[in-house]
């Protein structure tokens, strides 16, 4: 049966209707071979417009449909669903963008009309070479791997648990809770309660749908959304590993601290009574009194912000509030101690932080803004030399100094990123799919990154991200429901493949493997996203992206350029 193409031009209200002469478009397109009908409509994406298209396709017996309308990004899925309702393959519809690419960029109506005619002709020529593509359904495992047992991992694991979903919570250390479990006395000043964390840990340990694997490393994760095969191994051991299948992975591996010893200007480990945030936290947890190395109580303490910021090239954001918390703790417990906070940019980003800063000043904490600092002297006579923003030199003599090191990616982050085939940000943390549109996802479907694994985060930001990833999983990985992988994938013609494996190097999704027996590359269609990198790199032209074949694109471009 020959093709029977229907062409429909959407007025899109005044957007297209007033900028393009649609009658001229219809007149120019109607005589084209295989075009059975050309009509206009006020708003094809509306309910009435969709019903109109369904009736037209059925009544006219159309095999292909070309739509002159808005961007495919806006309504291609809408019109594909219309095609399905009308009984034709959804990939036999071509949406031609005459709004953004014609109506909105040409002030001259004649020019916009001529461009629209060219683009619609090109769409007609292209659709003649479209082939019907069939969707596939794959079974999906609803279980989830949560990698990391800190605050983010705990929150995600608890939120994900349900009767028909199992959660595997893997933590490389011996205990759950992360670093916050070690600093109970500071948490009240950080707007958090250690009792809440302990309660969450107890709930996890008593939940039959959560399997906790502490002192355990994840050795491998292979597969795709809905079907990841995970292998774990006890830390420091060769045997005793475990394998299981999950449908999604939540990375909540946390962070580490910048090594202050690598930067001499802070005097860390060279001058007694110079501490990091961690050191100070351990000190007050282990002793009821704040003491110097001599056993005496300090009379003055300098809290130095931004440790290693120059070397790291980024701000760790949350350190300012952590240091302010320490300053408030000292003033609340030891009102007589002088507290100086030396900072560059002071990050007070949440609603109540500014008030907290003002109250801190009222308690007598001395805030000094600086652009450079050096810790020198000796135990009992520590010298803090700094430069103000105006370039003036200043100097403080204190008994104790606490330096806030910047937050850096957790050790092993590059290895985990390589294992999961997800990218890293230039800072070394995991990179989100999109800062605004996909803040907890990654470029790999089914793999999510939350909390400080993605970069410095506050407690509340960490909890919110864990819950956001949970919401994504709940809406995309539904127990008992199959998943539909991408249809417009690449295919390899074995007769043309030389086995050079160039495609393996450029496939960002890890969707291509090499068949040693056949000597050819093979595409895993469940993982492939049809980006076309492999097709562009193949020296023997053995790879064809479905729905974006060379023939389709060539015919479309030639017709668009034809006068």
Image (cartoon, rainbow, N blue to C red):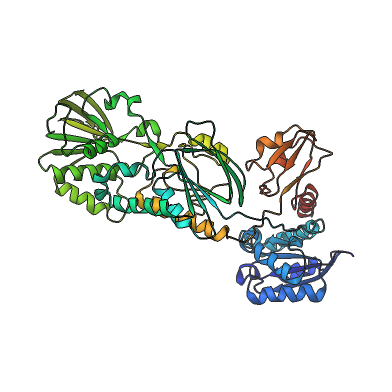
Residue closer to the observer: 120 or 499: 499
Residue 340 appearing in the image: yes
Residue 45: percent from left, percent from top: 64, 70
Q: Is residue 265 left or right of residue 161?
A: left
Relative height, residue 179 to residue 62 (above, below): above
Residue closer to the observer: 295 or 62: 295
Residue closer to the observer: 83 or 170: 170
Q: Is residue 206 left or right of residue 354?
A: right
Residue 246: percent from left, percent from top: 57, 49
Quarter occupied by the N terminus: bottom right
Q: Residue furthest left?
A: 336
Instruction: Count all numbered tags in the image, as a single digit.
Output: 0
Residue at the (74%, 60%) spot, across then down? 91
Residue 228: percent from left, percent from top: 60, 47
Residue at the (28%, 45%) spot, across then down? 321
Q: Residue furthest right?
A: 1
Residue closer to the observer: 368 or 433: 433
Relative height, residue 559 to residue 235 (above, below): below
Quarter occupied by the C terminus: bottom right
Residue 543: percent from left, percent from top: 76, 42
Relative height, residue 12 to residue 135 (above, below): below
């Amino acid at each position: 049966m020959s093709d029977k193409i229907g062409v429909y031009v959407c007025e899109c209200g005044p957007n297209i209707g007033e900028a393009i002469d649609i009658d001229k478009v219809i007149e120019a397109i109607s005589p084209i071979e295989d075009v059975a009908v050309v009509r206009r409509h006020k708003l094809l994406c509306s309910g009435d417009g969709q019903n109109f298209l369904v009736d037209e396709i059925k009544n006219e017996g159309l095999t292909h449909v070309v739509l002159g309308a808005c961007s495919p990004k806006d309504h291609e899925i809408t019109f594909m669903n219309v095609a399905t309702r009308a009984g034709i393959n959804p990939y036999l519809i071509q949406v031609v963008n005459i709004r953004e690419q014609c109506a909105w960029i040409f002030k001259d109506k004649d020019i916009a009309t001529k461009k629209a005619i060219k683009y619609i002709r090109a769409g007609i020529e292209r659709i003649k070479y479209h082939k019907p593509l069939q969707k596939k359904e794959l079974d999906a495992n609803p279980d989830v791997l949560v990698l990391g047992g800190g605050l983010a991992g705990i929150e995600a694991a608890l939120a994900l648990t349900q009767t028909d979903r199992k959660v595997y919570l893997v933590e490389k250390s011996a205990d759950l809770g992360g670093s916050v479990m070690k600093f109970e006395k500071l948490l009240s000043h950080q707007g958090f309660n250690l009792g809440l964390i302990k309660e969450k840990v107890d709930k996890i340990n008593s939940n039959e749908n959560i399997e906790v694997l502490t002192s355990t490393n994840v050795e491998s994760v292979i597969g795709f959304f809905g079907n990841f095969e995970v292998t774990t191994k006890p830390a420091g051991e060769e045997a005793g590993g475990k394998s299981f299948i999950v449908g999604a992975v939540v990375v909540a591996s946390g962070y580490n601290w910048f090594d202050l010893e690598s930067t001499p200007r802070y005097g860390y480990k060279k001058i007694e009574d110079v501490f990091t945030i961690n050191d100070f936290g351990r000190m007050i947890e282990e002793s009821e009194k704040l003491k110097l190395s001599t056993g005496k109580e300090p009379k003055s303490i300098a809290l130095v912000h931004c440790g290693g910021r120059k070397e790291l090239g980024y701000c760790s954001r949350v350190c300012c509030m952590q240091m302010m918390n320490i300053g408030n703790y000292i003033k609340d417990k030891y009102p007589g101690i002088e507290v100086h906070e030396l900072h560059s940019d002071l990050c007070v980003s949440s609603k109540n932080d500014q008030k907290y800063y003002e109250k801190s000043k009222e308690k007598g904490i001395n805030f000094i803004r600086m652009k450079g600092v050096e810790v020198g002297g000796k135990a009992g006579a520590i010298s803090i030399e700094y430069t103000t923003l105006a370039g003036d030199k200043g100097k403080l003599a204190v008994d104790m100094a606490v330096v806030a090191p910047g937050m850096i990616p957790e050790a092993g982050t590059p290895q985990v990123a390589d294992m999961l085939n997800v990218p890293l940000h230039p800072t070394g943390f995991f990179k989100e799919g999109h800062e605004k549109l996909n803040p907890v996802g990654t470029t790999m479907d089914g793999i999510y990154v939350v909390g400080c694994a993605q970069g410095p985060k506050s407690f509340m930001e960490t909890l919110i991200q864990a819950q956001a990833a949970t919401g994504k999983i709940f809406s995309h990985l539904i127990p008992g429901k199959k998943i539909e992988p991408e249809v417009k994938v690449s295919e390899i013609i074995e007769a043309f493949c030389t086995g050079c494996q160039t495609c393996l190097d450029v496939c960002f999704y890890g969707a291509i493997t090499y068949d040693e027996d056949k000597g050819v590359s093979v595409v895993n269609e469940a993982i492939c996203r049809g980006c076309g990198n492999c097709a562009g790199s193949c020296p023997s032209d053995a790879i064809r992206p479905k729905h974006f074949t060379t023939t389709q694109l060539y015919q479309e471009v030639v017709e668009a350029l034809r006068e």
